[in-house]
Structures are given as structure tokens and as C-alpha cells.
Image: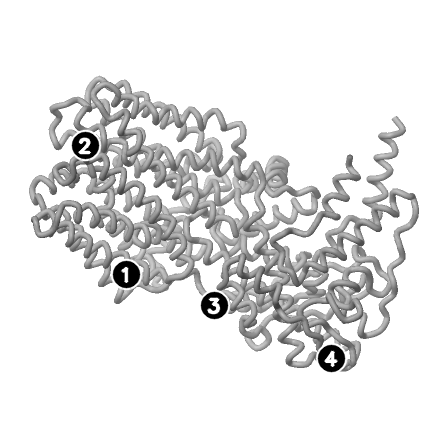
């Protein structure tokens, strides 16, 4: 069984998503592993590796470095690290299916080198079996592939780390991307992968050129250099991007269970809408406004307390506590004898919802690999808007005088369902490693989450977690459980005092205020009140708006990958402004009531493409890792405070202003448009060129040795000793 696992891990079929130019590489790799397995099973020696002694074969071999070879090393600089290869720049602009279709039609030419050898420009599929396909990993100087030297780097402080180029790339992603699952983060994730792939390909090409110069006295031709840059960039990018579509069952369960909290939160945003006429009839406008706004009173408290719960109880324990608050709040609200008790229950549910907005992005961000955090964040956003729609739909059946309590009871039922699934909920490995870097439990969880089979893979991932936590100021966040929680306040004070980020801080606060004072929750809280008299059945209009909200969320995801953040904010605020104008004119009688309904639909749609997700996204894009937590904390508190005022005051505004009730929101939106036009910086995830420049600057003092992208996996194969030990264990078991 043990032998079966090993051969399955190292003789697996190529992934279907891999770029075709590296297909031959995996075929060669599988053939080699199969030969080694056959040899061991027959108790013979592994097949000898053919010698590669001439310059041509050395150049075409996957690894240039044997166990007795050590490169002098290369250092990145602005002069040595050029622009993003054209092939890579155009590659990321295509959809994945288009990338595959395009790559299959790429020309595969051969280029004569200065040493008289031949190097496949994009693939070794032709030309006498040289290149990636034939020479492949089979040999270098009589050494089998797993004997080759591993790449390593020496930092400016003298510290040494031994990782393959792929492992180094993953480490950069861990360090540069926040431990948060936020919608829209995919753009920055992808740009970072492109930037590192280009950066690493340039280092690989530099070392290739140095190696050729030392062995043949010749350098790479300019055309050959460009071909190698493109080829190595695509090879590495393919491997980095593979993590974004590789998921395990434990991770799927964690995402689904945590997303139930956001679903429940969305449900509670809209649950008070449909049953308003039937819940304790005769209540005043003020008392109902307090019942709705109490949700926003509890929200800031939950957001504040969630950080302490997560540090003291762990991310899993904090999620469980939040689930119990939903259960308790839902039961109290369903059994409430008076509206006053409903107000108290809504406050409890608000605490749970506020905690969810903090805990879910952190928890999922710490479980997921860096280039999946944007996708997972998008899923949680969908869970929230679908929860809003679900509350509208169930209102058709339960929003009446005899069943309205069941609408509130559903809050507890959904939370109980989540509680039943908690055995599948894993603890955050980052939290465990923060408390104890040697945690065996953290390593076990990482192994399950990533599907690893070898301890070396697990330890490499642990290094990514610890390095990223250190760089992003895990100590300042109090996540290490060492009593330094007060330093979080210091990080916040430092953020406000830092003149370099002052405009970013102001922009974040302005957009958070605009997120709520644009009036969006007036629609979700009181659409029944607004549509009363506009259409025959207000619940139909409410449900229609909820459905459009879900569709608009999907459209927003597509636009965020194509448009700048500033552009989307300007379109969003302008579209919502004109929608408000049309709503007012419709209520004044200049247009039909159905025009008002359509205007509300466009109002919600424009919100979802800009002012909805971007105020949260720019925190992760604009701030350094040490400020992300402080910026998110301030943003969350301010957002909930503005949400409270909207929930409390809109019924009175509607009663006082009548058809002009959306006028104040229009004024806010006009001011937001002007601010975005004049002052808001563009934050579209930073371009690959800018990120590559940051990598060069960050690693200027680092020297890279044996940096070979083609041979980056060679040292990850099990050694002959491991194979022999596995077979010996199998024979002992069979002998028993």
C-alpha cells in the first residue's frame, strides 16, 4: 500500500490544465518514475542514466547542476531583470480556455546557438528528441535526476534558504497577499503570479547565460534569450496557477460551512422586510425602525469582539461561538412576546453578523492558498446576497399573520445545520503555528488541506505560513497569543500618522461612508415600505430586486478583472445618482411606477459593480500587510455605524420627504463621484510590471544559486534510499 501511494504520487498523469508546452516534460517524468518503480520491484538496480558530456546535451538537460556543481549565483537588479515577456503579458489577458487553445497553436521552432547546439524555442517535441521531451530529466553527467543539486538563495543578512523556484514563488505569494478571503482579489493574485514568473525566468536566463559562457565560451543570442524567457515564464506560471484550481475535500467543507454564516447574515439583512405588517400590528414607525436598526447596533460590537475571540479561542472556536449567537438570537426573536424583545434579539443577531464579517474572511484566508483567496471571498459574497434573496422568497409563504414567527425561527435552524457540520471544520493552521511553530496539529491540518503526501512538502508550507505571518506583522495582530494585543492599537495609530498612506486612509474612510450612505440598505431593509403603493404586491418588487442583486454580483466579478477600481467607483456612483433622480421623478408622477421599479433595479446593479465590493477590496490592495488589519478594523466599525443611521432614520426620512426620500442619497453619490474623479488613486491590483519592480527591490541583496526552472522538481523525487525503505517495509509486512 505504501509503495502504491509513492508511485501514484510520482507517476501521476499530467494535469489537464497544464500548458501544452510542458506536456512532454510530464510524460518524460512519468516514464522515468515508472522505470525506477519497475526496477525496484524486480530487486534490480535502476536503469543507468546516459552520460551527457557535450555542450549540446548539457544545455538541453533539465538541470544544469549536479551534486558537485555549484553556480556562482546571480543577483536581481533593474538592469538584469527586464520587462514582462510579451508572450506572458498577452497570456494573462485571455480566458483559460483561450490560453489552452492558443498554446496548442504556438510555433515550435529551433534556434541554432552560438555553441553550435540546438535549443527548442518552446518545446522539445521535435528535432531528434532533444529538449524537454527526450533528454528531459533523464540525466546530467551520469547523475539521476533526484541527485541533482537543489536551488538555494542567500539573503543580504546571510541567511540561507533552500527552495525550488516554484517554492520561492509560492512563498512570495504568501508574503505579498493578505490572509483574507476578499472578493475581487483574483486580479492581484494573478498579477503577482505573472510578476514572479517573469522575475524568476529572468534569473534562470541569467544563470543559463553564465553557465554557457563558462562551459562553451559563448553567450545566449538575443533571440534565444527572449525565447527562453517566454518559455520559462510560461512553465512557472502554469505551476503557480495550478494551485488556483486544485482543491481538497477538507477545504471545500470549510468554505461551505463558513459561508453559512454569511448566508445567515444576508438572510437577517432582509428578513424584517416582508413580515412588517404582521409582526405585532399597530407598532409605531419609530419602534419598527429600532427593531431594524438594532441589527446594526450589535454589528460593531461583534466586529470588535471577534478579534479577541479568534485570538483566544482560535478561529474555529470563534466561528462556533458566533453560530451559537445566531441560534440564541433566532430563538428569542421567534418566541418574542413583544416588539421590545424582538429589538433585543436583533441586537444579539447583529453581534453574530458583525463577528461573521470579520471571522469568515480571516478564517478562509488562512486556510486557502494565496491564489484561491479571491475566489473563495467571492463565494462568501454570493452566500450573503443569496441569503438576502432567500429571505424575500420565503416571505411569500411565511410572511403572514399566522406564520411570521417561522421566518425568524429559520435563523436558528440554519445555524443548527451549521453546528451539525462543525466536526468537518478545521482549525486555522496559521493560528496554531502562531501559538506554537512546532505544532503537530497544524502540520496535520496543512497536510489535509493541501493533499500533501510527504513531510518535506508540509514543512515547506509551514515555512510559507511562518514567513508570511512574520512579514505581515502577525505579532502586531495579536494572533500569536503572547499578550501583545495592545500593539494592534499601535499599528492603527502608526497608520494614521504615516503621511505616505494618508490619502489611502482618507479614501478608505470616504468609500466606507459612501457604501452605506448611498442608501443601499434602505432598499434591503425597507423595500416593502418603499414599494407600497408603487406596485400591487410590494413583495414581488422586493424579490425582483434581490434576484437582480445576485446577478449584478456576478457581473461585478467579471468587471473587476477588466476595469480599474477608480473607474468602477465613478461608474457606480454616477449610475446610482441618475437612478436616484429617476426614482424621485417617478414618484413625483413624471414617469410610471414601473419606471421607479426599474430605476431601483439599476440602482442596486450599479451598487454591486462598485460601491458594494470595492471599499473592502481596496484595503487589501492599497495597504501594506502591517496596516491591513488596522484598516479593516476601522472600515468595519465605520461601515456598521453608517448602516445603523440608515436603518434608523430612513422611515422618518421617507415619511418627511415623501417622493424626495432618495434625494439625500443622490447628494452623497454626487460628492463621491467628485471625490473619486479628483482624489481617488487607481488600485487595480497593481500591474505585473510594478509588482516585478517591487520584487527586484525587495530581493536586491539576495543571491540565487542553481536557479533552474526546468529542473525545479528534480530534487522533490524520493531518493533511492526512500524507495528501498518502502519496499523493505512492504516485504516485512508480506512476510508477517
Q: Sequence order check: which comes first, mark 3 or mark 2?
A: 2
The answer to whether residue 659 is above or below residue 625 is: above
User: Quick one: SS at disc 1?
Assistant: helix
Tell me the distance, in whole angstroms, between the alpha carbons under discs 3 and 1. 24 Å
The answer to whether residue 226 is above or below residue 473 is: below
Residue 302 can be seen, yes or no: no
Q: Residue at x 54, y 55 (%)?
A: 173
Q: Residue at x 12, y 46 (%)?
A: 661
Q: Residue at x 87, y 34 (%)?
A: 731
Q: Sequence order check: which comes first, mark 3 or mark 4?
A: 4
Q: Which residue is mark 1?
A: 570
Q: Which residue is mark 2?
A: 290
User: Circles 2 and 1: CB distance less than 8 Å?
Assistant: no
Q: Sequence order check: which comes first, mark 2 or mark 4?
A: 4
How busy is the neighbourhood of tag 4: few (under 14 within 10 Å), some, or many (20 plus)? some
Q: Between label 3 and label 4, give the one nearer the viewer.
A: 4
Quadrant where the C terminus is found in the figure: top right
Q: Between label 2 and label 4, give the one nearer the viewer.
A: 4
The answer to whether residue 297 is above or below residue 701 is: above
Q: Sequence order check: which comes first, mark 1 or mark 4?
A: 4
Tell me the distance, in whole angstroms, between the alpha carbons under discs 2 and 1. 33 Å
Q: Which residue is mark 4?
A: 113
How busy is the neighbourhood of tag 3: few (under 14 within 10 Å), some, or many (20 plus)? few
Q: Between label 3 and label 1, give the one nearer the viewer.
A: 1
Horizontally, residue 403 falls left or right of residue 57, namely left
Q: Residue furthest right?
A: 44
User: Quick one: SS at disc 4?
Assistant: loop
User: Quick one: SS at disc 2?
Assistant: helix
Which mark is drawn over residue 690? 3
Q: Sequence order check: which comes first, mark 2 or mark 1?
A: 2
Amino acid at each position: 500500500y505504501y509503495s502504491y501511494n509513492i508511485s501514484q504520487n510520482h507517476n501521476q498523469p499530467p494535469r489537464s490544465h497544464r500548458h501544452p508546452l510542458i506536456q512532454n516534460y510530464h510524460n518524460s517524468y512519468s516514464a522515468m518514475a515508472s522505470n525506477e518503480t519497475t526496477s525496484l520491484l524486480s530487486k534490480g538496480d535502476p536503469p543507468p542514466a546516459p552520460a551527457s558530456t557535450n555542450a549540446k546535451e548539457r544545455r538541453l538537460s533539465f538541470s544544469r547542476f549536479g551534486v558537485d556543481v555549484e553556480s556562482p549565483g546571480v543577483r536581481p537588479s533593474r538592469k538584469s531583470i527586464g520587462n514582462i515577456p510579451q508572450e506572458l503579458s498577452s497570456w494573462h489577458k485571455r480566458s483559460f480556455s483561450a490560453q489552452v487553445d492558443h498554446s496548442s497553436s504556438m510555433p515550435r521552432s529551433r534556434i541554432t546557438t552560438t555553441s553550435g547546439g540546438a535549443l527548442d524555442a518552446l518545446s522539445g517535441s521535435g528535432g531528434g528528441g532533444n529538449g524537454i521531451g527526450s533528454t528531459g530529466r533523464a540525466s546530467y553527467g551520469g547523475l539521476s535526476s533526484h541527485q541533482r543539486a537543489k536551488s538555494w538563495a542567500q539573503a543580504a543578512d546571510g541567511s540561507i534558504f533552500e527552495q525550488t523556484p516554484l517554492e520561492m514563488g509560492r512563498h512570495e505569494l504568501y508574503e505579498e497577499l493578505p490572509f483574507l478571503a476578499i472578493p475581487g482579489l483574483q486580479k492581484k493574485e494573478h498579477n503577482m503570479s505573472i510578476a514572479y514568473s517573469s522575475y524568476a525566468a529572468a534569473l534562470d536566463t541569467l544563470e543559463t547565460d553564465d553557465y554557457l559562457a563558462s562551459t562553451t565560451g559563448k553567450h545566449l543570442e538575443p533571440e534565444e534569450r527572449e525565447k527562453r524567457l517566454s518559455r520559462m515564464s510560461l512553465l512557472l506560471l502554469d505551476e503557480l496557477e495550478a494551485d488556483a484550481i486544485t482543491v481538497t475535500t477538507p477545504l471545500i467543507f470549510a468554505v461551505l460551512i463558513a459561508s453559512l454564516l454569511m448566508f445567515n447574515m444576508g438572510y437577517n439583512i432582509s428578513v424584517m422586510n416582508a413580515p412588517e405588517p404582521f409582526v405585532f400590528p399597530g407598532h409605531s414607525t419609530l419602534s419598527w425602525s429600532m427593531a431594524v436598526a438594532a441589527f446594526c447596533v450589535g454589528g460593531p460590537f461583534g466586529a470588535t469582539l471577534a478579534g479577541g475571540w479568534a485570538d483566544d479561542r482560535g478561529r474555529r472556536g470563534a466561528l462556533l461561538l458566533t453560530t451559537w449567537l445566531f441560534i440564541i438570537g433566532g430563538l428569542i426573536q421567534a418566541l418574542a412576546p413583544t416588539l421590545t424583545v424582538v429589538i433585543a434579539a436583533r441586537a444579539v443577531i447583529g453581534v453574530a453578523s458583525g463577528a461573521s464579517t470579520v471571522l469568515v474572511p480571516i478564517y478562509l484566508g488562512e486556510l486557502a492558498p494565496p491564489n484561491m483567496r479571491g475566489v473563495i471571498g467571492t463565494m462568501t459574497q454570493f452566500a450573503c446576497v443569496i441569503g438576502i434573496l432567500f429571505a424575500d422568497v420565503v416571505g411569500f409563504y411565511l410572511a403572514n399573520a399566522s406564520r411570521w414567527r417561522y421566518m425568524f425561527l429559520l435563523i436558528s435552524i440554519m445555524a443548527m445545520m451549521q453546528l451539525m457540520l462543525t466536526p468537518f471544520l478545521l482549525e486555522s493552521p496559521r493560528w496554531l503555528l502562531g501559538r506554537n511553530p512546532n505544532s503537530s496539529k497544524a502540520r496535520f491540518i496543512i497536510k489535509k488541506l493541501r493533499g500533501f503526501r510527504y513531510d518535506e512538502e508540509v514543512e515547506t508550507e509551514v515555512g510559507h505560513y511562518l514567513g508570511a505571518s512574520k512579514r505581515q506583522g502577525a505579532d502586531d495582530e495579536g494572533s500569536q497569543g503572547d499578550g501583545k494585543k495592545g500593539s494592534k492599537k499601535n499599528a492603527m495609530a502608526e497608520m494614521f500618522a504615516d503621511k505616505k498612506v494618508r490619502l489611502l486612509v482618507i479614501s478608505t474612510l470616504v468609500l466606507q461612508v459612501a457604501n452605506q450612505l448611498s442608501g443601499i440598505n434602505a432598499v434591503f431593509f425597507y423595500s416593502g415600505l418603499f414599494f407600497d403603493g408603487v406596485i400591487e404586491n410590494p413583495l414581488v418588487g422586493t424579490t425582483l430586486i434581490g434576484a437582480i442583486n445576485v446577478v449584478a454580483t456576478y457581473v461585478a466579478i467579471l468587471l473587476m478583472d477588466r476595469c480599474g477600481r477608480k473607474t468602477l467607483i465613478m461608474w457606480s456612483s454616477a449610475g446610482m445618482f441618475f437612478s436616484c433622480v429617476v426614482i424621485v421623478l417617478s414618484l413625483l408622477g413624471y414617469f410610471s411606477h414601473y419606471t421607479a421599479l426599474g430605476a431601483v433595479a439599476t440602482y442596486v446593479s450599479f451598487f454591486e459593480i462598485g460601491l458594494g465590493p470595492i471599499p473592502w477590496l481596496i484595503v487589501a490592495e492599497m495597504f501594506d500587510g502591517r496596516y491591513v488589519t488596522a484598516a479593516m478594523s476601522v472600515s468595519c466599525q465605520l461601515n456598521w455605524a453608517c448602516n445603523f443611521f440608515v436603518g434608523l432614520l430612513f422611515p422618518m426620512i421617507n415619511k418627511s420627504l415623501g417622493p424626495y426620500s432618495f434625494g439625500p442619497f443622490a447628494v452623497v453619490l454626487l460628492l463621491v463621484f467628485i471625490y473619486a474623479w479628483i482624489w481617488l488613486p487607481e488600485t487595480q491590483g497593481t500591474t505585473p510590471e510594478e509588482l516585478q519592480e517591487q520584487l527586484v527591490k525587495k530581493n536586491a541583496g539576495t543571491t540565487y544559486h542553481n536557479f533552474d526552472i526546468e529542473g525545479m522538481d528534480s530534487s522533490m523525487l524520493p531518493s533511492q534510499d526512500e524507495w528501498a525503505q518502502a519496499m523493505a517495509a512492504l516485504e516485512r509486512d508480506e512476510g508477517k
